[in-house]
Amino acid sequence: MRAVIQRVSSASCTVEGTVTGSIDTGFMVLLGIEDADTQEDLEWLAQKIAAMRVFGDENGLMNKSLADIDGNILLISQFTLFASTKKGNRPGFTRAARPDHAIPLYESMIRKLSALLNKQIQTGIFGADMKISLINDGPVTVTIDTKNKE
C-alpha cells in the first residue's frame, strides 16, 4: 500500500457535482492498493496515519497527532500511485490492485481509521472520477509505502 498524506486546513471531494466528503483541519490521504497488499499492510499503515505527529504544538514544533487536535481524514482511493513510468511516456498501472481485491481493503481502511480515531472518515467514491480540492497546510506532505518502511 502507498499513501500520500497531506496536512490540510480543509479538503473536499466532489463526484458529479455532489460533495461526497469534506473536512476542515486534518489529513487528505490518497491511498493506493496493489495486489500484494494484505490486512497486515493495512493495519500497519492505519496505525502510522492515526499516530503521525505533524501538527504544531504550543512551541510550533510538529508534535501533535490527529487525535491531539481532533482532526479529520478525507480518504481517497488512488490507483495511480502505482503508476509505472519505466517505459515510454504513458504510465502503466499493472501493479494496482483490481477492484475485487482493492475495494475490500479500502473499505477496511475506512473502518480501521474510524475505530482508531473514534470518528467518521470522509471519503470519495472508489473508481469514480473525483474532483479533489484542498488547502495544504505548511505545506506538509508525507509518503508511506508499506513495502518500503522507512
Image (tube, grey):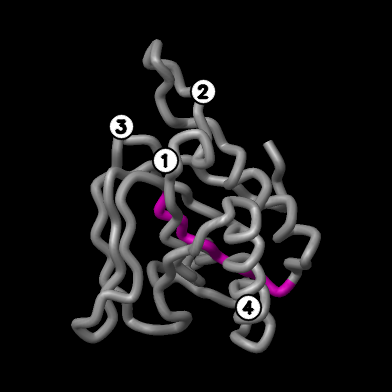
Q: What element carries label 4?
A: helix
Q: Position of residue 117 (x, y in %)?
A: 58, 51
How dense is the environment of label 2, judged by Cα within 10 Å: few (below 14), some, or many (20 and up)?
some
In the image, what residue type sits under mark 4?
Ala
Residue range in magenta is 27-35
Closer to the chain start, of discs 2 and 1, is 2
Asked if the residue under mark 1 is in contact with the one under mark 3, i.e. CB atoms within 8 Å, the reply is yes
The quarter of the picture where the C terminus appears is top right
Q: Residue at left 58%, top 55%? A: 118
Measuring from the top left, give residue 65's x and y in whole percent.
52, 35
Within the image, what quadrant is residue 112 found in?
bottom right
Task: Return the residue at label 1.
Answer: 141
Q: Name the residue under label 3.
A: 138
Cα separation, mark 2 vs mark 1, equals 15 Å
In primary-sequence order, the first of circles 4 and 3 is 4
Q: Is mark 2 on a helix, strand or loop?
A: strand
Which residue in the protein does label 4 denote? 102
Crowd band around label 4 with a 10 angstrom C-alpha radius: few (<14), some (14–19), many (20+)? many
| Magenta segment main secondary structure | strand
Q: At 43% across and 51% down in the image, what residue appears?
A: 72
Q: Distance of mark 4 from mark 3, alpha carbons?
A: 31 Å
Disc 1 residue type (three-letter): Thr
Q: Which mark is residue 63?
A: 2
Q: In whole angstroms, how far apart are the C-alphas of marks 4 and 1?
A: 24 Å
Q: Is residue 16 magenta?
A: no
Circles 4 and 1: CB distance less than 8 Å? no
Quarter of the figure that contains the N terminus: bottom right
Q: Position of residue 128 (x, y in %)?
A: 38, 84
Which mark identifies residue 4? Answer: none
Q: In this view of the protein, which residue sits in the foreground, 25 or 34? A: 25
